């Protein structure tokens, strides 16, 4: 769809869009010409980012490293999953992925060439503790030590996610995240990382997308270990929140320089209608999907994510757990990709099951997504869709950032991931150049909205584009490309896309019309 078609289609939908605005969000009225969700050129031209703003990209160990069984690494749940027939699109694995375990000097040189100042990466737990407990595997530590040194030499801040989904399989065999013992195992692991790398890494987050770890792994069954039990989901969520608190204390005890934050998935939730029920449902979505773990850390309690009282018993909540959950974050990190429209389902009969697709990462039965939160969350298609199937809705980042800023007393914010999947590849007639204009447009609009949030007072200090280079996209295998750099998986040849070159200029100038 070209811009004109998009504008025409979207104008028709403009009236409908007004309904979706969450009353809690600051609402800037749409002008008649403005495409809902899109951004006027003037905003892009005026956008400025503060001096010292940290431009970066994000990656995750399993998605880029490969070397799945080298240097003493143990098996992870993602190794087990991808090695099981029928799990991943195309039957592919992350055994080699981008081979970054061996090629990281080249990738860091590319990031430097693009003027990057921050690299969010994750450490593979089974490289450090092959079975999830016990003494560290020094070959694993040494690898990340060299990696961090290379980043620092390139003038890039190392930003460490301790867990981006690759649980040691041995810990899944002990019950996985629903087993509360994992909170302490995780804290031991976090302490090992801080002890060995905390002289150079100062920015730590325990989990990438803790809600997804619990829901996708234990309720929707779409990701390993593929369980479909809502009580396991709730137990897993509680263990993850406890682990967040315990890891916070372990990291601070081992490294005086450490700062501790998060990498939560978030999507602004707009009620489907103006009814009280839908507004309450949108508030439950926000509580469950966006701030569940943030509230646990900041306040030592869970937000009102449930119809009725939180199901403490099912979660395995014990007296005194409030104290363990409490671990105020030094800064708040979250992702932005798209938005959700939420409606109430509490009056309908709950039936388990529902739909799951790799792009729309919800599982919604007619009676709600699960028996406790009782809402339906959908991704609308009013804006255009990326090739990966997510709606383009730049304004969502403004709404989300301003709400978090207001609700948590203007914390330091880091955008930990944000990006779009488009399949553009090398154009042989243009010498292999990769003209991915749609990705540039996506970033221009999202970043203009982010600049607007900053101008309105949000203390955002960093933005990490997802992702540095095309990589293994979980259940979708290699069929989605989110990179600023193209990777040819046949020979591991990296080519900077037009979007990468553009992002490099943005990083150098703190403006968007470059
Ligand atoms: C996020 C994940 C990340 C990547 C992007 C596209 O949900 O954190 O690993 O797959 O989606």
Image: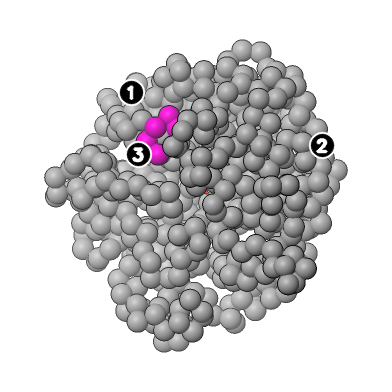
Q: Which of marks 2 and 1 is nearer the N terminus?
A: 2
Most distant residue in the bottom direction: 32
Residue 31 position within the rendered picture, expressed as x and y whole percent measured from the top left: 43, 84
Q: Which of marks 3 and 1 is nearer the N terminus?
A: 3
On screen, residue 498 versus residue 231, left or right, reads: right
Tell how many labels.
3
- Of residue 47 and residue 69, the one placed in the foreground of this image is 69
Q: What residue is rendered at 30% in x and 71% in y? A: 19
Q: Quadrant of residue 35?
A: bottom left
| Pointer 1 residue | 316
Give the residue number, with chain letter if any, for mark 2.
149
The picture quadrant where one finds residue 498 is bottom right
The Cα atoms of the two marked residues, 3 and 1, are separated by 20 Å
Against 409, residue 49 (above or below) is below
Predominant secondary structure, magenta span: loop
Q: Where is residue 422 in the image (x, y as percent from the top left)?
A: 56, 62
* SS type, badge 2: helix
Across and down, in percent, residue 194 comes to 68, 27
Q: Is residue 458 above or below residue 356?
A: below
In magenta stretch: residue 224? yes
Q: In this view, does 312 lie to the left or right of 92?
A: left
Front residue (pair 335, 246): 335
Tag 3's secondary structure?
loop
Which residue is label 3 attached to?
Answer: 220
**Which residues make up the magenta segment?**
221-226
Residue 423 visible, this angle: yes
Asked whether the viewer can see residue 58, the reply is no
Q: Residue furthest top?
A: 134
């Amino acid at each position: 769809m070209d811009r004109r078609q998009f504008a025409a289609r979207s104008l028709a939908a403009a009236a409908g869009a007004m309904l979706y605005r969450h009353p809690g969000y600051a609402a800037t009225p749409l002008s008649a010409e403005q495409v809902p969700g899109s951004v006027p050129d003037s905003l892009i031209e005026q956008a400025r980012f503060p001096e010292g703003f940290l431009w970066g990209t994000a990656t995750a160990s399993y998605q880029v490293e490969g070397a799945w069984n080298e240097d003493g690494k143990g098996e992870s749940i993602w190794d087990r999953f991808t090695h099981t027939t029928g799990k991943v699109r195309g039957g592919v694995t992350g055994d080699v992925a981008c081979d970054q375990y061996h090629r990281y000097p080249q990738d860091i040189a590319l990031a430097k060439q693009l003027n990057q100042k921050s690299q969010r990466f994750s450490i593979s737990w089974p490289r450090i503790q092959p079975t999830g407990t016990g003494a560290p595997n020094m070959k694993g530590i040494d690898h990340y030590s060299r990696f961090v040194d290379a980043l620092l030499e390139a003038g890039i801040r190392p930003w460490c996610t301790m867990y981006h989904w690759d649980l040691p399989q041995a810990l899944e065999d002990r019950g996985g995240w629903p087993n509360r013992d994992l909170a302490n195992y995780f804290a031991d692991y976090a302490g090992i990382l801080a002890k060995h790398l905390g002289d150079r890494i100062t920015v730590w987050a325990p989990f990438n997308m803790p809600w997804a770890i619990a829901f996708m792994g234990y309720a929707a069954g779409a990701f390993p270990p593929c369980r479909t039990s809502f009580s396991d989901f709730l137990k897993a969520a509680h263990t993850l929140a406890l682990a967040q608190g315990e890891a916070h204390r372990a990291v601070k005890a081992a490294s005086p320089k450490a700062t501790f934050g998060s990498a939560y998935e978030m999507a602004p939730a707009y009620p489907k209608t103006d009814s009280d029920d839908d507004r309450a449902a949108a508030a439950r979505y926000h509580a469950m999907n966006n701030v569940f773990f943030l509230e646990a850390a900041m306040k030592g309690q869970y937000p009102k994510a449930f119809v009725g009282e939180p199901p403490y018993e099912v979660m395995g909540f014990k007296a005194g757990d409030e104290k363990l959950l409490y671990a105020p974050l030094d800064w708040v990190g979250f992702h932005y990709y798209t938005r959700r429209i939420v409606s109430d389902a509490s009056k309908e009969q709950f039936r388990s099951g529902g739909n799951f697709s790799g792009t729309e990462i919800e599982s919604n039965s007619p009676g709600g997504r699960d028996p406790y939160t009782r809402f339906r969350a959908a991704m609308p298609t009013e804006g255009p869709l990326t090739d990966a199937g997510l709606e383009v809705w730049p304004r969502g980042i403004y709404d989300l950032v301003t709400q978090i800023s207001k609700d948590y007393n203007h914390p330091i914010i880091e955008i930990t991931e944000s990006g779009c999947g488009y399949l553009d590849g090398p154009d042989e007639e243009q010498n292999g150049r990769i003209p991915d204009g749609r990705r540039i447009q996506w970033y221009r609009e999202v970043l203009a909205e982010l600049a607007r949030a900053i101008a309105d007072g949000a203390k955002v200090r960093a933005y990490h584009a997802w992702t540095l280079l095309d990589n293994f996209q979980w259940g979708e295998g290699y069929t989605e490309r989110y990179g600023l750099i193209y990777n040819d998986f046949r020979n591991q040849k990296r080519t900077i896309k037009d979007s990468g070159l553009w992002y490099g200029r943005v990083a150098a100038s703190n403006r968007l019309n470059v």
